[in-house]
């Protein structure tokens, strides 16, 4: 497994992109909210309050945060099973998200979807898709719709490194390029599939960037832990899409702090590897950067405390939520609210 | 009243819907400039240039685009050239389109139609002749329609396009040359409605798509032999018009299904199971399924004709079963 | 005699076959170095480094590789992590693997096995919990097996690997922790053989995979209430042991199927249709299907438990039907 | 649609590759056999003796011929529905191939497969696959088997330009490269899908060559009508595969003289476009080249006459063949010869 330096990344993110303080603090605030939500989701899974599964973005929050801030209301997010952060980053209510993880009636999906399928259509979070590849093709459809309806909405689709090897990736990128669709594909390269290093199953070192030319696109590589750099990359890709410049394919190199899902201890990764990436923690490193840049500790602490209060309140709301009523099993197959397949 | 072929009825029905609703869009392979490999979409691209698009050979991308467009305000119709090719995009159909409304607690609507050329009889062999409507029927969240006449092509296609849920629309490629009367003006039929085409007292023959004309031909022959059969065109597998079907079966006490799909787990098995559970006492004998055997379809004409149910096989099976 | 979990039985059975025949190879995602995401293939890569391979997330490439290897002298076993993902490679399964021997007039042999984790109960939601054995049963050219015990995992997996035809092997992910006795030494079972697990005189309950223990639990409860049920584990949908099934049904006159798959077009409908046609006079009442409703599976535990047939639902349905 | 010159091709093939006479005449002989078989197949379709469909390689024969001669017995061919030429080029008997087109009992597939599925396993023609994409993944499996069994067999997979846009293409190329499989992928770029120009639905000008780098492969472009150049390209790719050098992706630019299938008049192509490519006819241009190189006309005429005699005999054998017996419907689903799914 290549080290961050071998991957061409600085030991800690540079945060060189110039951002005004207000924007910087919004990014920090969002990363804190995502970080604390994910940590709580992990605790609740270990307490068996989150049943089934959960896939966390711990360590990858900068990507969801940068795009979440750079996107406009009306833009669309298409996420994967690892989609808590991306859904919250669009403004989905934290208590409903947490309640969904717990399978409660007050969950975003009334308990019917669970952790892997968080969706908040009213916030432009158009779904979390749990079968690798499909949602890249679906994002194209939203982008196509924006153009046909003459709006300037953009679809942003997040996926992992391993997803670049499935057929749907290829079909989606080609169609997006041929139709010059307003869509931004964001590959979060965290160097691992589930338990397999991406390098061992991929023909090129950069799973997304080294494929861009196959679709007539420019390769775009970003430090996936540098929220400032990501914000700039996001803003540029969104502008390009909005102004008719067509799709972008961005590879953001990052790392997940924990296992792939559930209670996975991620023993397949070396301690050195994990340590090197912990030093690149997108939240902690940005905090130091902001302090160096003169932001008062008190301001940061207040942001952190507020985020924690929000997560605690969401947890309580989720725990207090009732179990879904059993008739939900037969609801919402069809637009009329029923599951009737016969008369 | 105009006489159209089943093939022309497809373009006619699509034009009607593209005309009726500016949010209707249509995409597929070779469908625009070339008017479709079955020439079923000729002229649409000229009339609706921005809303009729040619796509690459990327069925997953085609149906994914339809799905994403449907959830953001359009009413897409996508063509999958041969229904066999649904297998290359089955994830989008069965796991994405069929489940997303349910998984999201009803947040997402998917008003879309997937049109496809289904069925055998053209000597195209095992990979271009399948009847796969039962694949779709087995997946919750999909509506499934299969017209047998030009008129039903127009009316059911309109109903499918205007339906708020995803509909798989199975055109039968052997019926494309079939001619039939299509009333002038807008036609909008209703999903979930079977049609009783003939009423008889001795048995009820239920058929779908290309098996409908064969069932009717068989009924005529049977009548000559003194067996008076009711014939029902299912038309819509989901929703299924069990009311009409159960009534037609109860009235005669005997059910025969005529299915083009291979033997196992077809709509016939489902219908038989429903009928058994709900009209048990009205039955005077066991329901009988007439199907293609459980084999891939052979290419040679003699073999394909032997495999797919024929009017003669229906006559023979019914006669034998009724001991006439 | 050793006690193994159903999960351990998978690795045990694969090891037995890799040991027995050097032409057996195994590939899948995360199966080698990591031993599988369900930890069902732990230790195999260490023992058979050249024959156990990790693959990219490319299900079509995985099954295509298995198919090409099978037609050129190997006996591949491929893992599709969750059976829901068969949809992304359904073309390889349903159009290529299932049809190639037939299309080539028997020139090509495809001795291969596709192993996959099927079924619900783990709160994984609609895209990771499906029972899709009926998708496979509906496609001619595929053999379809679904074991319910650790012993059957080993024996049926061996039978599948040694079979000259393609076999879809559905492991039930909710059964992985289940413990059971597995005899020492090589075990090779036979495809196409159902197992009568309990004999009773009042009705016959037929179940598959995770529904088998529930059917047995229901039978015990029913016995306490004075209803004596025969319970049969289908084990193999293709080939189907109709001899055993028809005999078991004729003996009691009443059939109840317990299916995890959604309502429409499941193996239960097929079995009911066969039973009706062939044991009509032996039946004392209509066969009844107990299934998951025709909906995608919900994630929340209370909802998922309500959707999938439970022992209680079986008891209730049987009791009601028998008017006891 | 770009002209041959715009595609970087000479007005007529150069045939610059040095081949000894014996090899040159073998290539010419094979091209003549394929050309005349295909012309006859077209006539028989128009006479409704070939039922269903047929897809011809008229104009593309140089590719099947060059590989057919360069491959060794034991190597495997994986073809598409447009597979008559590729199957015959491996030595499959012409009369059985013709009989299969006519759906006769003496057909290669006993009448069960038809024109789209020609297969002669004993000659290494491992099948013609009629659903775009799948057979690229299947070819990988044969190559994998060769390596595991320690043979030096190579799998060669032929497909069209349109096929480069389907997911299976991407998955197959990546796996072949990661596993360094002895497989050669040959894209016959005839500039058209069915009725749609490949350029209108593809993000790059060279549908295969411009994708090679996405799999860490060298782009290989060839004049698909230059049988001599193709022979060299084939020999190099086969050597590379045999010697452990891994897969190759070759794009051979060519053109079909007729329609996509059946009676398609191909009206969607301009007369100039067709004319320019008729001037590049791989068979006629090679004939002129051989004459210039001093091959006696009599020798060429004897080759042509022999090919015609073979095609005529095959046609007669096919017409004389009996219809398949009806019990074939229920045969050969399983290895035991039956279709029994129950006891
Ligand atoms: C088609 C398909 N194959 C396999 C899986 C199982 N699976 C879930 S996540 C995952 C790894 C995905 O890796 P990557 O794309 O890098 O995303 P990450 O989990 O690292 O964010 C796999 C193989 C799946 N969900 N869908
Ligand atoms: C998955 C799939 N989609 C569509 C088709 C229908 N179809 C058959 S051939 C063809 C065009 C293929 O074009 P190309 O790959 O360039 O090959 P060519 O026919 O030009 O040799 C299409 C779309 C198919 N057979 N399979
Ligand atoms: Mg990853
Ligand atoms: Mg082409």
Image: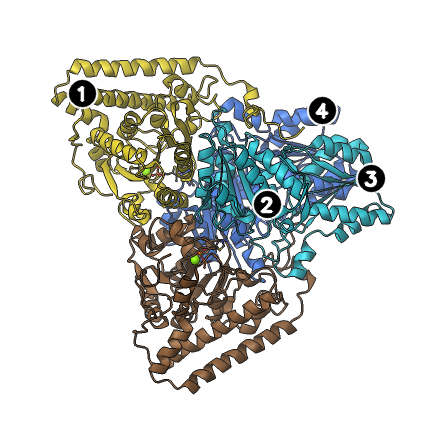
Chain colours: A brown, B blue, C cyan, D yellow
Q: Quadrant of the N terminus of chain A?
A: bottom left
Spot occupied by residue A159 in the image (x, y as percentages of width and height):
43, 59
The answer to whether any part of residue B72 appears in the image is no
Between D119 and B72, the one lying in front of the other is D119
- Discs 3/4, front: 3
Residue beneath disc 3: C200
Which residue is depicted at the point 28% across and 30% down?
D63
Task: Name the foreground residue: B277 vs A188.
Answer: A188
Callout 1: 10 Å neighbours few (<14), some, many (20+)? few
Image position of D60 with respect to C301: above or below = above
- In the rendered structure, find residue D21 and report the number of the disc placed on it: 1
Q: CA distance from mark 4 to mark 2?
A: 36 Å
Q: Which residue is mark 4?
A: B320
Q: Quadrant of residue A262?
A: bottom right
Q: Residue at x 55, y 36 (%)?
A: C17
Q: Are marks 1 and 4 on the same chain?
A: no
* Residue B23 versus residue A104 in the image, above or below: above
Asked if the beta carbon under badge 4 is closer than 8 A to the nearest atom of ligand 2, the reply is no
Tell me the residue at 74%/33% (across/down).
C246
Q: Which mark is residue C132?
A: 2
What separation in Å lies between label 2 and label 3 (alpha carbons)? 30 Å
- Whether label 1 touches label 2, CB < 8 Å: no
């Amino acid at each position: 497994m290549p080290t961050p330096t071998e991957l061409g990344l600085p030991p800690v993110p540079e945060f060189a992109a110039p951002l005004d303080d207000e924007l910087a603090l919004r990014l920090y605030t969002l990363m804190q909210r995502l970080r604390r939500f994910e940590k709580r989701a992990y605790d609740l899974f270990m307490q068996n309050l989150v049943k089934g599964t959960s896939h966390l973005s711990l360590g990858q929050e900068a990507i969801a945060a940068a795009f979440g801030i750079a996107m406009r209301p009306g833009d669309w997010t298409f996420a994967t099973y690892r989609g808590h952060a991306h859904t919250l980053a669009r403004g989905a209510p934290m208590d409903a998200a947490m309640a969904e993880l717990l399978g409660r009636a007050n969950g975003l999906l009334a308990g019917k979807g669970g952790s892997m399928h968080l969706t908040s259509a009213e916030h432009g979070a158009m779904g979390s898709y749990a079968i690798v590849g499909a949602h890249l093709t679906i994002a194209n459809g939203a982008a196509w719709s924006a153009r046909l309806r003459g709006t300037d909405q953009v679809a942003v689709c997040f996926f992992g490194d391993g997803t670049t090897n499935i057929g749907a990736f290829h079909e989606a990128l080609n169609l997006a390029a041929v139709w010059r669709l307003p869509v931004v594909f964001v590959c979060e390269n965290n160097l691992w599939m589930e338990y397999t290093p991406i390098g061992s199953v991929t023909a090129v070192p950069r799973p997304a960037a080294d494929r861009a030319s196959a679709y007539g696109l420019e390769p775009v590589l970003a430090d996936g832990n540098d929220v400032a750099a990501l914000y700039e990359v996001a803003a540029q890709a969104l502008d390009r899409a909005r102004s008719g410049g067509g799709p972008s394919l961005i590879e953001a190199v990052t790392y997940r702090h924990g296992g792939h899902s559930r209670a996975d201890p991620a023993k397949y990764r070396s301690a050195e590897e994990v340590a090197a990436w912990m030093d690149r923690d997108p939240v902690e490193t940005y905090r130091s950067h902001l302090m160096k840049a003169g932001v008062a500790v008190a301001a940061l602490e207040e942001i952190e405390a507020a985020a924690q209060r929000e997560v605690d309140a969401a947890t309580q709301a989720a725990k207090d939520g009732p179990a879904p009523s059993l008739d939900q099993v037969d609801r919402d197959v069809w637009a009329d609210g029923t599951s009737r397949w016969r008369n | 009243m105009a006489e159209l072929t089943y093939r022309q009825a497809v373009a006619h029905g699509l034009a009607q819907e593209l005309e009726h609703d500016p949010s209707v869009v249509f995409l597929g392979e070779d469908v625009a400039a070339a008017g479709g490999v079955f020439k079923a979409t000729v002229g649409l691209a000229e009339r609706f240039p921005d809303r009729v698009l040619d796509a690459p050979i990327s069925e997953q991308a085609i149906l994914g685009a339809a799905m994403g467009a449907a959830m953001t305000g359009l009413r897409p119709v996508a063509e999958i050239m041969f229904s066999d090719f649904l297998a290359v995009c089955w994830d989008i159909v069965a796991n994405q389109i069929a489940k997303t409304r349910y998984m999201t607690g009803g947040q997402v609507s998917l008003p879309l139609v997937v049109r496809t050329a289904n069925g055998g009889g053209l000597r195209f062999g095992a990979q271009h002749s399948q009847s796969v409507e039962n694949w779709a029927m087995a997946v919750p969240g999909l509506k499934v329609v299969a017209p047998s006449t030009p008129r039903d092509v127009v009316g059911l296609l309109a109903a499918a396009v205007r339906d708020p849920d995803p509909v798989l629309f199975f055109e039968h490629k052997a019926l494309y040359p079939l001619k039939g009367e299509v009333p002038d003006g807008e036609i909008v039929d209703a999903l979930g409605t079977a049609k009783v085409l003939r009423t008889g007292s001795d048995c009820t023959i239920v058929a779908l798509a290309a098996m409908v004309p064969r069932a009717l031909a068989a009924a005529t022959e049977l009548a000559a032999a003194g067996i008076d059969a009711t014939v029902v065109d299912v038309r819509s597998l989901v929703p299924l018009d069990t009311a009409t079907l159960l009534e037609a079966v109860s009235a005669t006490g005997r059910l025969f299904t005529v299915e083009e799909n291979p033997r196992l787990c077809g709509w016939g098995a489902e219908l038989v199971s429903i009928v058994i559970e709900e009209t048990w006492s009205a039955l005077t004998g066991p329901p009988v399924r007439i199907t293609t055997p459980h084999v891939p379809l052979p290419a040679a004409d003699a073999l394909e004709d032997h495999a797919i149910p024929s009017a003669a096989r229906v006559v023979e099976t019914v006669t034998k079963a009724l001991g006439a």
